Amino acid sequence: MGELIFVGLGLFDENDVSLRGVEEAKNADVIFAEFYTGLLAGLSLRRLEKIVGKRIIVLRRRDLEDECGESILRAAENGRAVLLVPGDPLIATTHIDLRIRAEKRGIKTRIVHSASIVSAAMGLSGLQNYRFGKSVTIPFPVNGRVSRTPYDVIAENKRRDLHTLCFLDLDVEGGRYMRIREALKILLSLEDDIGGGILGLESLAVGISRAGAKDGIVKAGSIRELLGFNFGDPPHTLIIPSENLHFMEAEALSVLADAPKWVREMIK
């Protein structure tokens, strides 16, 4: 019986992969990797291959989505295959689908977990994880049209007194990575169109860039302030907090994210 092991690469570069993940890769018959579901800004494929001691086959989006990962499944049916993925395995729906397909074909699957932007963003901001509601992706406009889903999710979370973690769209193969400034402009345009009164230039937001890197940035402030703030290179992540903060959340934002003094007025 074959085996497929999903190995998380973590947040930033090849040094984030766990020792267990390296061991699994070294014992694999074939190693695949995909880099389109997340950006590992500091990763070098050559250095990663040196760490695992083997050639790595880099997959395209269509290999997993259009062809349903057939090349991986065939390799796993005949031996031990490893799939290296950004962040933590199974955060992306694509990987869950592949795991289901493997199990249905009698291929044993295992997971080697790693750091995820989901937990990292919550921890870096100092906002309490149990106060986050549904997360959402802010996508690039298509033919000039902007999806209103991010606005609706933020509105619902705010009604429930919850924070919103916003993933920013990326097109790795096309070299496009949404930045915090672009995401905020999209949200403000949705506010102008919908008029729900949930966001404005003075609303609190938290921007995070290059989580896991030595030069990563965490900055809290008004949307007006963050629109003019330089977060540097991607990947970027955005949090829209609730209208109310726990006193420890306000303290964390002040100390860890250079938040303005008025965040203490949001303590309830």
Image (tube, helix red, strand yellow):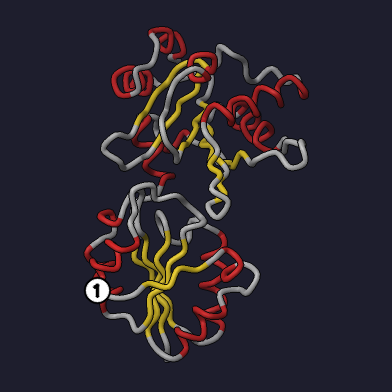
Q: Decide which of 113, 193 is in the foreground and name it.
A: 193
Q: Is residue 246 left or right of residue 16?
A: right
Q: Is residue 233 above or below residue 110?
A: above
The quarter in which the N terminus is drawn is bottom left
Residue 40, percent across and down?
39, 50
Quickly name the residue at label 1.
53
Q: Is residue 14 above or below residue 257?
A: below
Q: Residue at x 53, y 42 (%)?
A: 177
Residue 178, percent across and down?
55, 38
Q: Is residue 25 left or right of residue 264?
A: left
Q: Decide which of 67, 20 is in the foreground and name it.
A: 67
User: Which of the 4 image quadrants contains residue 230?
Assistant: top left
Residue 21, percent across and down?
29, 67
Q: Amino acid at mark 1?
A: Gly
Q: Decide which of 159, 83 is in the foreground and name it.
A: 83
User: Which of the 4 image quadrants contains residue 122?
Assistant: top left
Q: Residue at x 37, y 61 (%)?
A: 8
Mark 1 lies on a secondary structure that is: loop
Classed neighbour count for the residue bearing mark 1: other residues with Cα under 10 Å, few (<14), some (14–19), many (≥20): few
The quarter in which the C terminus is drawn is top left
Residue 89, percent across and down?
43, 61
Q: Residue at x 33, y 34 (%)?
A: 216
Q: Is residue 42 above or below residue 130?
A: below
Q: Is residue 75 above or below residue 18?
A: below
Q: Residue at x 26, y 60 (%)?
A: 18
